[in-house]
Amino acid sequence: MSIASHIPVLHAGGETVVLAEDDALIVRRPHEQMHIPLKAISRVRAEGQSVTIELTAAPTTDKAHVHQVWDVVDSAAAGAFADAVNAALPGPSEETEGVDGADLVWGERLYQPSYRNWLRGMKRGALVATLVVVVSCVLVGLAGDPVALVFIVPFGFFGILVLSFGAFLAYAPVEERYLRKHGVRTTAVRLRDQPGRYAYTDPGGLVRTVRHSVPAWSIEAAYDPRDPGRVVPLRSRGRRLREAVLVSFVLGVGLLFAGGAVAAVVGAFLGQFDDMA
């Protein structure tokens, strides 16, 4: 029987589940999965509704890497989970002595949640705007103003396309601004065999990567402390300013076309009211 067989399943916020499988802990989130062997764990601590999985440290360092599980559903369950894992730990041996537990941890990331949510919001916004334009065309058509339709259709749909493109361009600066304010800064080092990709180590000792288009031996990046795989390279102020100008210009053009469509709709109905008067 596996020594991990009596460890209860732990449920936490963000649909996080921690379970024991094949003498290892699996920290499973909707977008990624971490595999932590029990022999890589020094101890597990429960602190209220959070659980800290502390890894073994190499003799050359005093700092132990940790994996944090936030917003556990029940503090009692957190304590029971920590006690069960600590009781199941194999303890020190010749095989694990002097080994950094972080070297035994590996993970797999499926997608970037913040990017997926941004795209989902863009699609919903574009769908709502398209429905508004279609309804406006129907109402203006019933009002008998074909001239207004000539402006509403191209201005409305082109405005939606341009605004969607502007929203797409805005993701990177908005994400960087958020992580500059709320994230943790770290140094990422260039990978020799992967141009444009840089590696950094998260608090749990897992080596992650981030892309950057400007060649350098190392870059500064910022990641979310609750999701270290959510990371952006920190760019210079000049580059951020140029990108902000571009995004503002694209959104401004989109709003100009959308405003033209709105003006055509308003003009059509005002003309209808004048005729009735």
Image (cartoon, grey):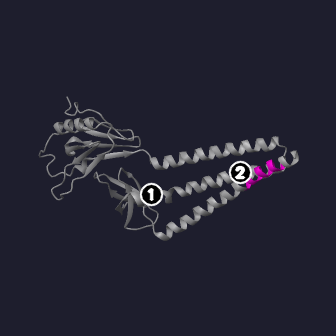
Numbered label tally: 2
| Residue 156 image label | 2
| Dot 2 crowding, Cα within 10 Å, few <14, some 14–19, many 20+ | many
Decide if residue 70 is on the left or right side of residue 91.
Answer: right
Q: CA distance from mark 2 to mark 1?
A: 31 Å
Identity of the residue drawn at 21% across and 38% down: 85
Identity of the residue drawn at 62% across and 59% down: 251
Magenta range is: 260-271
Q: Secondary structure at mark 2?
A: helix
The quadrant the N terminus occupies is top left
Q: Secondary structure at mark 1?
A: helix
**Is the residue under label 1 in contact with that under label 2 (CB below 8 Å)?**
no
> Can you identify the residue that label 1 sits on?
178
Q: Relative to 100, does residue 196 appear above or below in the rendering?
A: below
Q: Position of residue 111 (x, y in %)?
A: 44, 46
**Amino acid type, label 2:** Gly
Identity of the residue drawn at 58% across and 45% down: 123
Q: Residue furthest front?
A: 277
Q: Relative to 83, does residue 200 appear above or below in the rendering?
A: below
**Amino acid type, label 1:** Tyr
Decide if residue 31 is on the left or right side of residue 274.
Answer: left
